[in-house]
Amino acid sequence: MIMMVGSQRDFDMLAGKGDGVAFKPEDLEALHAFMTKWNNDLVESGEFVDAQGLTAPVHARRIRLRDGVPVVTDGPYAETQEVLAGYTIVDCASFDRATEIAAKLADTPHPEGLDLGREWYVDVRPCVGSMDELE
């Protein structure tokens, strides 16, 4: 699973609002074109399994159990700046190949001068098919 992360600020910039550099319509078009090609390349190679983008952290809820009672907290969460923004599942020959696929996201288009306030990254983790694979 290739996991893309983002903060509420990132989602706000994509929506063209918030502080800092906002994505203009042409920036969004370039981003969508890049992601469409990246996904279509995976479909054509037979490695694509599934992909989903997730809503902004402001639409998230965290549920915890306190004294046996569920407690619901609306997002975003002060203690968590970055959350899962979307994912792509690939079925490929090796973990190295999955890493190679994820590395292509390093060229994701963005507005000139954009400062995320952090280093950009994606995570790659194998999905487990059974309890035996949890080692």
Image: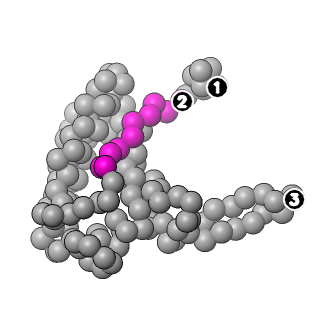
The amino acid sitting under disc 3 is: Asp
1 or 3: mark nearer the eye: 3
Which portion, as a residue range, is magenta?
A: 119-128
* Residue at image point 24% right, 37% down: 103
The amino acid sitting under disc 2 is: Val
Q: Is residue 127 magenta?
A: yes
> Label 1: which residue?
131
- The 10 Å Cα crowd at callout 1, few under 14, some 14 to 19, many 20 or more, is few
Q: CA distance from mark 3 to mark 2?
A: 32 Å
Q: Position of residue 46 (x, y in %)?
A: 27, 33
> Label 2: which residue?
128
- The 10 Å Cα crowd at callout 2, few under 14, some 14 to 19, many 20 or more, is few
Q: CA distance from mark 1 to mark 2?
A: 7 Å
> Label 3: which residue?
67
- The residue sitting at the bottom extreme is 17
* Residue at image point 31% right, 24% down: 96
